[in-house]
Amino acid sequence: MSVSFQELAGSPVEHYDLDGFRAERQFLIAWNDRDAFANEVLGIAVEHGGRTWAGYPGKSSVFAIRLRYEPFDPNSLDVQALPELTSGLNRYTDGFAKATVEYRTVNPRDRADGPENEAGTHLTYRMSFATIDQPITPRGWSWADNPAAVPDDLELVKTIPLTEHRLTWQQVVNPPWDAIRRLQGTVNATEFLGCPPGTLLFEGAEANKLFRSGFEAGASEFCWQIVYLFREKAIKQGSLAYGWNHAYRDDPPGWAELTAGSGPLYDLADFAPLFRSATA
């Protein structure tokens, strides 16, 4: 590092829990080196791909996520008058700052069978579920112990599980906005996250800024956290899984793919472009 520092006694403090590894380290730096030290710890967005978050020694999946400063010796304050709240700050020209750096586990990639993410970015995965009740016609059904057809007024309902797959792509400098817009509302053309073709619908994305140093002048630089939401509908019958383009029919009975002549109900697509940065 280019900024001189000294780690303080009592540092680090480490935590192990079900969310992974977390830690805090405290450093002593010159008060006037605060911005430069932030650049070293949190990274600079324009240099993304070469240097990003500072890692934790000995733990390849633990990174600095937050930095806090306070005067190390409040009595080293420069004597000055501050006539307005916006005219300046307390100065400690010859003093020191105590920097507290927080670290946590951020895996580069949670699922080995998931999409490839670019070097320097992080792709986390979460899953949840819901269900829908799908009414289906009784025509074509019969009792297992009686070959006679069931009554036409029998109410048949099939409960269909819906699995929500949430992929969070962090430290993205140039999100693929065009690909997000183009692929929203399509289903997977090939297996994705273990889901058979046609069973995974890309519902859309949420985008949040992650600020990255550049604190000394003007607006801070930032990269993005992109949260992708995919919803899986796999209607399992026999050895097959029917998806978003299928509906139940009674003649002949079973699940069949819908088409309007020009194409299916949902277009098929390759989701890989969602995880490639746009050209700057």
Image (tube, rainbow, N blue to C red):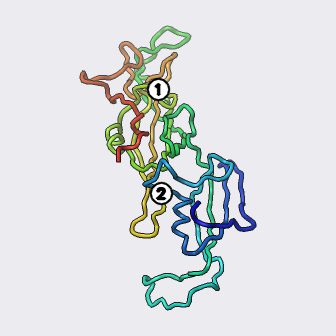
Element assignment for label 2: loop
Q: Residue furthest left?
A: 262
Residue at 61% from the left image edge and 67% from the top image edge: 4
Give the mark nearer the N terminus: 1 vs 2: 2
Q: Is residue 41 above or below residue 81?
A: above
- Tell me the quadrant of the picture where the N terminus can be found: bottom right
Position of residue 87 in the picture relative to residue 95 (left or right):
left
Between 137 and 128, the residue placed more toward the observer is 128
Between 158 and 185, the residue placed more toward the observer is 185
Residue 146: x and y in percent read 52, 9
Q: Which residue is mark 2?
A: 44
Q: Residue furthest top?
A: 147
Residue 191 - label: 1
Between 207 and 231, the residue placed more toward the observer is 207
Q: Is residue 78 above or below residue 132?
A: below
- Location of residue 223 by image quarter: bottom left
Residue 219: x and y in percent read 39, 66
- Location of residue 220 by image quarter: bottom left
Element assignment for label 1: loop
Residue 265: x and y in percent read 32, 28
Residue at 43% from the left image edge and 82% from the top image edge: 86
Residue at 47% from the left image edge and 33% from the top image edge: 232
Mark 1 to mark 2 CA distance (whole Å): 36 Å
Residue at 52% from the left image edge and 16% from the top image edge: 239
Circle 1 packing at 10 Å, graded few (<14), some (14-19), many (20+), is few
Between 171 and 126, the residue placed more toward the observer is 171
Tell me the amino acid under the disc marked 2.
Answer: Ile
Residue 93: x and y in percent read 56, 81
Tell me the amino acid under the disc marked 1.
Answer: Glu
